[in-house]
Amino acid sequence: MPAFHPLPAPRASHRPAHGRRLLAAAAATALLALAGCAVGPDYQRPAVAAGASLPAFKEDGPWRPAAPALPDAHTPWWSQFGDPQLDALVAQALAANQTLQQADAAYRQAQAVVQGASAAFYPTVGLSASGGRGRSKSNGQSVLGDTHAWSLQAAWEPDLWGRVRRTVEAGSDSAQASAADLAAARLSIQAAVVNDYIQLRIDDRQKALYARTLEGYRQSLRLTQAQYRAGTVMRSDVALAESTLASAEAQAIDIDLTRRQLEHALAVLLGKTPAEFSLPPLAADAPLALKLPVTPPGLPSQLLERRPDIAGAERRAAAANAQIGVATAAYYPDFTLSASGGFAGAGLTAWARTPDKVWSLGFALAQTIFDAGARSAKVDQARAAFDAAAASYRQTVLAGFQDVEDNLAALHQLADEQQAQDRAVSASNDSVRVLLSQYRAGTTNYTTVITAQALALTAERTALQLQGRRYAASVALVKALGGGWDAAQLPAMARASAEAVPASTAPDAVAAASPAK
């Protein structure tokens, strides 16, 4: 790869001063014109599914009850559940969660990458100094002398082909993607805290249900034992009552295990060890005071801007597009300007004497002639990486639409299921009361009673689980809609390309302006 090395101080030119000024002006104009070009395709957001332009989601129908407006970044969406303790837990998690700390560090690292890439726009300046004392021989004479030198060096590589601008553009887009990742991590932590807390409170209500049920089973056991002693029932009825009681006690213990594990999960989300955190259970007669907010989904097209994972995937596609320009810039020569000045001479006392002044100006031009297709392979690699990032973006959009539709359908169907289940609970409780009265009167057997009691327990537990699923679907819908986040919250990173960079004249450039971010 041939190169021209820096030259010593140029000779005085005999060209008239006016001609030299015209030549300098023409050279500066040419450099500015070249500096406006950036090779590689300008970014265009990948096209997404046509469903993004529809006026409504498929599962968004008239069944949805009146609900508050879409959450926004200034209103914590979890406050709609109306539980101050939940609000406090989410605040603690946002302040101490280690996953958020990791995402924040990744974002700061991406910012530093942009700053490092932007430094290539400017010259590098260095300072060196040396001094010495030594003995040498000259014409048979031993000479003892001192030497000194110091100089200031500067080098600058003009970004003629836009390689630096594309590099900074890629870093800026990647930093914006990291900012979206941080927002997505924050939303995931919020949703995890809300879900775990709600499920823990559902378990509290299930424990209260089992406490009432176990007391009823114990009364039934005492009644059966009394009737067995009176000789009106068989020993098998007593054994069945004992078995039913023991089975319910085992199920109650399993619920307690689930609650403990949820408490441990909440501790970790809050940045604590399980030993440092405990959440007292609800009183047995305390109702579940959580409200059930239902968030309207808005327009499908809004989803592209409201979900941080979609925004992050789109920014990664933009970064991959910029890398095509970085790889394409390798086809063009490297041009470097250099200058240095200083003093060098004998003796250590006078470091700035006019006779010791030295300086140089020069340039270097280097161009690869043959690389066996290495540059072409890197461009192809960059294009393939962009295609992969674009496909990932489209898939993220599709998954986002699925999340919204799934949870809209869940809210609809679970509401209907809850109504049916409430009727089942009411009917099963009435059945237990009637059959117990008949059993005391001796007009029915205990197997019928215990079957009705088991059905009543199952019906009430299913009703509580449905309530938990409805809360979970509401949380999932808020998360699927971005939780009030918006792409406008992405930091406005300093892009290398100017506000009005003309379209590249490279053969593979796409003369299209980048969309607003």
Image (cartoon, helix red, strand yellow):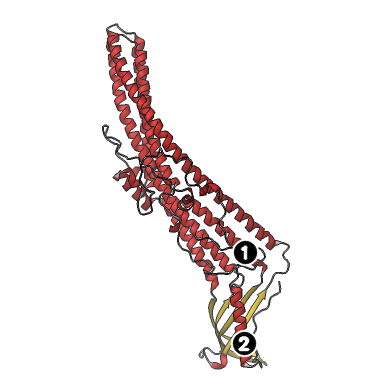
- State the SS at label 2: helix
Whether residue 224 is situated above or below residue 53 in the rendered picture? above
As displayed, is residue 181 above or below residue 22? above
Does the rendering let one see residue 379?
yes
The x and y percentages for residue 339 are 58, 82
Specify whether 221 is left or right of 99.
left
Between 375 and 99, the one nearer to me in the picture:
375
Question: Which residue is depicted at the point 41% across and 47% down?
Answer: 189
Give the crowd class for mark 2: few <14, some 14-19, many >=20 residues within 10 Å: few
Is tag 1's residue or tag 2's residue first in the polypeptide sequence? 2
The residue nearer to you, when weighing 8 against 336, is 336
**Residue drawn 31% across and 24% down?**
213
Amino acid, disc 2 = Leu
Question: Mark 1 — residue?
Answer: 40
Of 497 and 109, nearer the camera is 497
Asked whether disc 1 touches disc 2, contact meaning CB atoms under 8 Å apart, the reply is no
Coordinates of residue 475 in the picture (x, y in percent): 40, 43
Residue 472 x %, y %: 40, 39
